[in-house]
Image (cartoon, coloured by chain):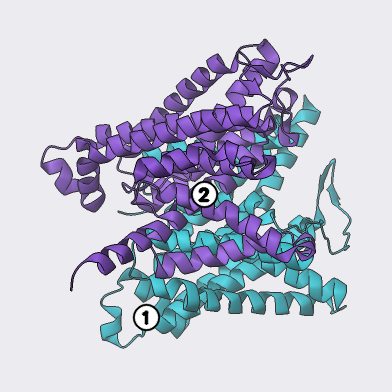
Amino acid sequence: MKYLLLALLAGTPFYGIGNYPLHLVIMCLLWGYVYTSWSIMGRLGLVSFGHGSFLGIGAYSVVMLWNHFGVSPWIGAVVGVVLSAVVAVIIGFPCFRFKIVGHYFALVTLALSEVTRLIIVALRDQTGGSLGATPNTALAQGNAWSFGALQFSDKIVWFYAILAVWLAGLWVWAKVDRGMTRLALEAISHEEEAAASIGINVTRSKLFVTLISAVMTSIGGALYAQYQLYINPETVSGISISLQMVFGVIAGGMYVMLGPTVGAVFTLLLAEGLRLALGDAFKQFPALDLAIYGLMLVLFIIHMPKGILGTAQEAWGRASRPH
Amino acid sequence: MEIFDIFLLEAVLNGILLGGLLALLSLGLNLIFGVIDVVWICYAEMIMIGMYAVYTLHVQYHWPLLAAMAAGIASVALLGALMHQFVIRPVLSAEPINQLLVTGGVLFFLQAAATLAFGIEFKNLGVKLPPVAIGEMSFSFPRIIAFAVAVAGVAATYLFLTRSYLGTAIRAISQDREIMPLMGVSPGRIFVATSALGGALAGLSGCLLVLQYDIHPAIGLSFGPITFLICVLGGLGNMLGGLIAAFIFAQFISVGGFVFAIEWGYVIAFVFFIAVMFWRPQGILGGK
């Protein structure tokens, strides 16, 4: 069943759905991957508002190194990953060591994502500031793709690349889910002192998932930059995108593997659906989808804290269980 | 060198003026956190609604500015009470992080609602007040007004909390949420009153900000983060700590912005915040 669905998904480019729908599918997978990365630590009680920082570091590392030094995005992505890991440790280690949890953790990481956005804006001579940046094209003279520059004009290539990354993200999620660290962190998120007293190394366990999550998010940022070929401090860093990740996960379902992906699909389809349903009216009300989205988030958190997929699974489980 | 010092002094004084405003911004949020134990991530968006209310009444309906401001404050106070009643109350017993997140949903909603109602264009009151020159230094007049009103607002809130019955009950609830119901204080009503008061303070902040800045739907994002960080730096719920933190932050922004560039002022302030968090996670004045 699982593999059948996957095969169906893998065939998407050949259904003749056209470029724009294919683009939407790619965006769903890409954001699904990023949200999954966030949820690896979010579901274990580490609600970070700082993932905009890792996304931004990933995206700007590849574009800046490519544009200013001609360094291949492959190396740029590695640099971004290393930078993100360093930042994650610099922020994470003291946070976990000094038991900064809950609200305080959320707000410290919020400061981090704002710092990243402001630094990008402040370095406007190099980064282009709020106007954003575009990677120099490597696709001149009819070249359809350049592997070294990680630029492909063909959406099919991107579809498979991002599908693979998304699957890898799910694999890591499942790996962490089955590992001892998850059990340790679940114990920690319930009662940190008690967990420490039975010999769980709280700092190390938290740092472990934070590093995984940060590194994955950074790769997501690099992919986003290479696929969209345009980045902007507001869309890859700062408070907005950080909150968007958190809410995508909540809407979809934080505690199930495909929850974050469902959240990403839901968010994108809501905007697209409203665009189609409202037609021209949509152009007059540019923020209608966001208003509905915000309202739905409030209702979700109040009435469906397990998210769409989590609630659906629960209902499914109840229905199939004999009474 | 002398000129440099004069400008540095100007930056320091401007920082003090900004500090008063930031103190007022963070006061309402701190009050709500201290009493209800919930952080309104959307607090800055409520301030934005206040700004739009003043703008609409004054510019579109030609109300006198002061009447528009009074109505603005009242409408945000009402919004605060509604916010508590319909958004916070249902999640009071849920996990704390859900309470934080639900207000984030309100943030998106208010931002989008403002875009729907007013568009993304920058709006302003069109009230231009001349700068005040003292020697070689010049200060923006709206900033001086904002500082004075903010200080008065903080003082009035302090008096309200210490001298009135309702204020005493609010402080009592914030000290012990379990015992107070036994003493005949209804926490539900106190929570609504606190939310309305927090909303009124947001409305007042909006009135002061609208004198200085253009309004646009995303304006909350530009001063929202700094407001939370001030509260956390001072120790969430600790109002005196919040005041001190506001002035510290304002100096970083103003002097840092003067020496480098305005974004670097913010970067320094945020990095300072992160560093202090590691040193005193409970905030500079927060208890355990």
Please tell me the colour of chain A.
purple
For the image, the number of numbered tags is 2
Residue type, mark 2 in image: Ala
Which residue matches tag 1?
A: B187
Query: Where's residue B273, x and y in %?
Result: 49, 41
Identify the residue shown where x is 74% and y is 74%: B69
Viewer-proximal residue among A271 and A96: A271
Q: Is residue A156 left or right of residue A2?
A: right
Q: Residues within 10 Å of mark 2 (few under 14, many from 20)?
A: many
Please tell me the colour of chain B.
cyan
* Chain of the residue on which disc 2 is drawn: A
Viewer-proximal residue among A215 and B41: A215
Query: Where's residue B204, x and y in %?
Result: 66, 69
Determine if residue B20 is in view.
no
Of tags 1 and 2, which is closer to the observer?
Answer: 2
Residue type, mark 1 in image: Pro
Viewer-proximal residue among A253 and A152: A152
Identify the residue shown where x is 72% and y is 78%: B70
Task: Reply above or below: A233 against B182.
Answer: above
- Residue at the bottom extreme? B184
Report the disc number at residue A264.
Answer: 2
Determine if residue A255 is in view.
yes
In the structure shown, which secondary structural element does the residue marked by tag 2 occupy? helix
Query: Where's residue B236, x and y in %?
Result: 43, 56
* Chain of the residue on which disc 1 is drawn: B
